[in-house]
Image (cartoon, helix red, strand yellow):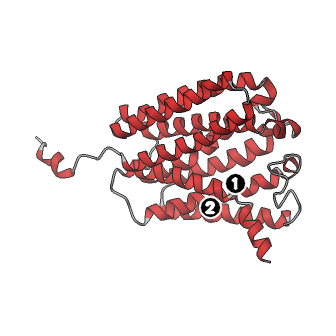
Amino acid sequence: MREKITNYLLVAKPGIIFGNLISSAAGFFLASKGRVDGLALPATLIGISLVVASGCVFNNCVDRKIDRKMIRTRNRALAKGLISLKITISYATILGIAGLALLWVATNLLSVVIVLAGLVIYVGVYSLYMKRNSVYGTLIGSLAGATPPLAGYCAVTGRFDMGAFILLLIFSLWQMAHCYAIAVFRFDDYATAAIPILPVKQGIAAAKRHIVGYILAFMAATLMLTFGGYSGYSTFAVATVLGLSWLYMAWSGYDASDERLWAKKLFIFSILTIFILSVMMSIDFTAPVPSEMLLSYAP
């Protein structure tokens, strides 16, 4: 029984949930500008995490046959038939409904719609079709992956403004470079499973060019946080250093003697990059003008 419970927990991909928890918090804190609602914050993070978990469980259900072909995933519980598919689908459904219900009660309609859209895109569009049939699957998946921080931000603001758009750009562009690095690192797995991701479909050389391009675009998007007045110059400095370092690592791939090792290092650094940037967005926000100051300047 204990092993089965563990399998049901692992099928929700705790690592991915944790990563999205960090990015969701970053969006929430960025929008809060130091005025954090102590009740809305945990409710928002738990709600988003439940929906992310739902998407991960559904994804495991959809990918169970593909997972058997890949070294990295062949020991997953569903791939090995260790847990019931029917129960797992019910489990995913309950997680999703619970998360959306909590967000409905604790946040606003926009946040709920964003999270629901992310779930539908990830499971319905990406997992069921695009991943198996199109080289553009990663692009579609990146939009779903950007919804947690976007929902965290909109849970506070209740509107889709320039800050929300910048977050969408940052996390979508980051995921493109991040996922292509994984695909190069795990090239044989993706090729064996016949997944038409760009490195497999167009070659590793093409993937390197795309990675460099996406990192450049990611750098520009991160700097928009400061130029747009959403974060301070500390974030600008950190984002610049991280971006240039990540770009240097990506560029070094053109001369890499071991492309798999290069891609693995790039993948690890991408996680470090988005983690540090999320922390900076959480603590280096631009404070709003106090209401008493606004009144003092009133005509």
Q: Measured from the top left, where is residue 269 in percent x and y? A: 58, 40
Q: Quick one: quadrant of the N terminus?
A: bottom right
Which residue is at 58% across, 64% downward?
101
Residue 265 visible in the picture: yes
Q: Quadrant of residue 199?
A: top right
Q: Which residue is nearer to you in this view: 260 or 148?
A: 260
x and y percent of residue 13 in the render?
69, 57
Q: Position of residue 225 (x, y in %)?
A: 41, 36
What type is the residue that disc 2 sits on?
A: Leu
The residue singled out by tag 1 in the image is: 55
Q: Check if mark 1's residue and mark 2's residue have beta carbons within 8 Å.
A: no
Q: Is residue 44 left or right of residue 281?
A: right
Q: Earlier in the sequence, mark 1 or mark 2?
A: 2
> Pointer 2: what residue?
50
Mark 1: give few (<14), some (14-19) or many (20+) Cα within 10 Å. many
Image quadrant holding the C terminus, namely top left
* Residue closest to the eye, 277 or 125: 277
CA distance for labels 1 and 2: 9 Å
Callout 1: helix, strand or loop? helix
Q: Which mark is residue 143?
A: none
